[in-house]
Image: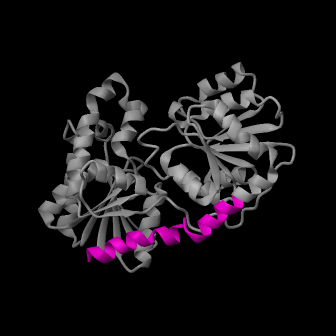
Amino acid sequence: MKILMVLDHEFPADVRVEKEIKTLVAAGHKVELACFTRQGRNGYEEKDGYVIHRKPISTFTYKSSVGCLKFPFYFNFWREYLTSLLANGVYDALHIHDLPLAQVGAEMKKKFGIRFVLDLHENWPALLQVSAHTNTTLGKLLSSDSQWRAYERNYVSKADRVVVVADEMKQRLVSTGIENSFYVVPNTLGKETYAGLTTTTDSHFITLFYAGGLNFHRGVHVVIEAISKLTQYPNIRFRIVGSGKYEEALKAMARNLKVEGKVEFMGWKSQTEVYEILNQSNIALIPHLRNEHTDNTSPNKLFQYMLAGKPVLSSDCRYIKNILDETGAGICYEDTNPEDFASKLKPLLDSPDLRVSMGQKGVAAIRDKYNWENTSRELLRLYEELI
């Protein structure tokens, strides 16, 4: 099949999209990707057997996306862009990444008679509920939760096929009354991701590791408070790779709790550096606060941690808890409870054998089931059934 994928971001920068494209190309499909650019990248590029189309987008149009359900500017950009591509090329399927452009996908399906695949990376309405930019006064005026949920019900139903990242996401959509053909393709990793990297932990410390953005909903404050309660473990070191608007508040919290010497804010690092710091760690953390979004998403870091052979200590977000309970690769605590975090961390601090055992179970789960080579079969099945 000849597939036109649509991504409302810069590319390359989306690992999931790149993996999907490479999988489909390797299976014999022809893939072209339409995205925008704000960085002056080439409008046309051939890369690794597929084609990238890029169209410059103005700052105004880009920022208007937050109010796309109320004002036409953002959708008009994509309507014009995709109409031009579809009118001048013969495609068998239009593959839209994530919910915002679902309406445009449905319109192109009707206009050109093309099959429409919707690929939901996120529980979008729930994500907007906890996003900083939609919780300002202006953001609440531009982005309505009820409108987004009605939009989701309407346009997910109009797709010919729907990709989701977690079975929990599929169950949520079905529970709202949406009927469609769903295909679960988690954010797993290729087995080769850690090729050439070796574990070199520091025997002087037991190092906790977190990588990602820093906002309140990431739950890092729960970890810092818990560390302050574990005074009997002077050799704990908590390394935070990432940054965000909540970083200064977390640093102040660490100072106030007198654990600033145990908490290292390392900023953003390259992917290779992240893997190296992870491999030097003993325990990997996913402290995200539970909400409708985190209960239904498949975080890359879960599979990164498991592939690296690190025991995972996570908040009890539904998807993550189900994976850890199934595989034995880690343990969960009550998401907002630092006392529970501390009690669940203690056995891992006390027992190197337990850390090794959980790490080995994570590696085995990646090898046997939770790898891209295996989970991407659902994506291939989708297109086999769409032909």
Q: Tell whether 207 sits left or right of 128.
A: right
Residue 71 shows in this picture: yes
**SS assignment for the magenta stretch, majority:** helix
| Residue at the outermost left position | 111
Nearest the viewer among 361 and 310 is 361
Q: Quadrant of the C terminus?
A: bottom left
Nearest the viewer among 98 and 348 is 348
Instruction: Tell me what residue is drawn at x 70 percent, y 56 percent.
Output: 358
- Establish if 94 lies above or below 335: below
Residue 43 shows in this picture: no
Nearest the viewer among 308 and 109 is 308
Q: Tell whether 350 sits left or right of 79.
A: right
Indicate the position of residue 202 as horizontal and vertical percent values.
83, 48
Instruction: Tell me what residue is drawn at x 30 percent, y 70 percent.
Output: 3
- Establish if 49 lies above or below 14: below
- Establish if 74 lies above or below 233: below
Q: Tell whether 264 sits left or right of 57.
A: right
Indicate the position of residue 38 as horizontal and vertical percent values.
39, 46
Instruction: Tell me what residue is drawn at x 80 percent, y 49 percent.
Output: 351
Indicate the position of residue 360 as horizontal and vertical percent values.
71, 62
Nearest the viewer among 240 and 7 is 240
| Residue at the outermost top position | 256
Q: Is residue 256 magenta?
A: no
Range of residues picked out in magenta: 359-387
Instruction: Tell me what residue is drawn at x 56 percent, y 32 percent.
Output: 336
| Residue at the outermost bottom position | 28
Q: Quadrant of the N terminus?
A: bottom left
Q: Is residue 382 magenta?
A: yes
Quadrant housing residue 128? top left
